[in-house]
Amino acid sequence: MTQPLAERLRPRTLDEYIGQRHLVGEGAVLRQMIDSGRISSFILWGPPGVGKTTLAQIIANKLETPFYTLSAVTSGVKDVRDVIEKAKNVRFFNQHSPILFIDEIHRFSKNQQDSLLGAVERGTVTLIGATTENPSFEVIRPLLSRCQLYVLKPLEKDDLLKLLDRAIHQDIELSKRKITVKDTGAILRYSGGDARKLLNILELAVGTGDDDSEVVITDELVVNRLQQNPLAYDKDGEMHYDIISAFIKSIRGSDPDAALYWMARMIEGGEDPAFIARRLVISAAEDIGLANPNALLLANAAFDAVMKIGWPEGRIPLAEAAVYLATSPKSNSAYLGIDKALALVRETGNLPVPLHLRNAPTKLMSQLGYADGYRYSHDYPGHFVEQQFLPDELKNHRLWMAQHYPNEEKLYQQMLRCWGDRFRDDQS
């Protein structure tokens, strides 16, 4: 059975590899690492079809080291441990640590990722992870701290044209055919920077005619073939990052028309409805926030509705949520507040909890002063009594700064009634 074109053209060396010059071009960081023969664990983050798996295989071939592959979709903790055990057994016969390549590492659970830590730290395996999701959100911090992170970009127009030419003239099957490329606009547009998608579209456009039959690739031909067979190529990643960015920025910028347009682009591109729903929930908390707290409730309700009623009817609650979020007043005070708090924690470290705020479940703790002096707010008028809740070193430090939309203004005025000058905007 003939292999798919994308597999037949998979590069075997860095010289055959197309794109990602910022990583593997002459003098680039990953190229230098590969040429030196000393590879440390790293994670490749980028959209589908940009060469993450191929790059890992090229590195293994270059170093002539055992290469193990796991998919986060089908592998469990036992599979990880089995591979690590195999790697231990071959480690003595090779100067390089075996490479463990994990595709879609962002789908590994915390337990699965924890099971990797020791082997990566001891050098039993060199981990190469691949992910289409931001690893800072999906990969546990201890594992991320042991890996370099390299960002792969969608292939540029020149890269795609080079790949197209190589496929037509060097592929063992297509090189036998009479293929002329008249137009490239449609094939480049639909590929969206994805090499695999471009090759799949080319294979579909060329068809399975006789070797002697001539094929002229035009924009019209590509569009017609794709319409006839819409599942012939992977639509899930079509301009994935650019379109979701435009969608969220349209909501943040209070443009419901643009929000609906970019949502429609995602729907037509085959995007996972759950992905759209998750981004709406995030936007409701990050961009609308306390200016309209109902936005988070509605976005979450839309997410639940999509899960319950399915597709295509799910597009309606998603559209409702998108319009509501786009037309809502905006505040990012909570988002800025938590980021400011995280920065402060990283700067100041593990400051002790004031004694009066500590729990005192034992007699010894009470004798040591735990909970001594704490005042129960509900015992006081207005359910408030002034006392210190931050560590001594951060007493009266401000993290949340109100943004004065009507809903949030009420919260701000309540803080002024409670705390007075501490919460005035001109106080630091």
Image: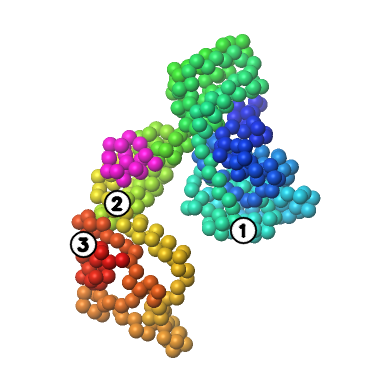
CA neighbours of label 2 inside 10 A, class few (<14), some (14 to 19), many (20+)? many
Q: Which mark is residue 288?
A: 2
Q: Does residue 171 show up?
A: yes
Query: Magenta segment range?
Result: 245-262
Residue at x-position 22% and y-position 68%? 416
Residue 45: where, in percent of width, then height?
53, 44
Q: Quadrant of the C terminus?
A: bottom left
Q: Main secondary structure of the magenta part?
A: helix
What residue sits right under mark 1 in the picture? Answer: 117
What residue sits right under mark 3 in the picture? Answer: 410
Instruction: Check residue 21 for magenta coloring.
Output: no
Labelled pair 2, 3 in contact (Cβ < 8 Å): no
Q: Amino acid at mark 1?
A: Leu
Report how far apart the C-alphas of labels 2 and 3 lie in the structure.
16 Å
CA neighbours of label 3 inside 10 A, class few (<14), some (14 to 19), many (20+)? few
Residue 74: where, in percent of width, then height?
58, 46
Labelled pair 1, 2 in contact (Cβ < 8 Å): no
CA neighbours of label 1 inside 10 A, class few (<14), some (14 to 19), many (20+)? some
Residue 273: where, in percent of width, then height?
40, 41
Label 2 sits on a secondary structure element that is helix
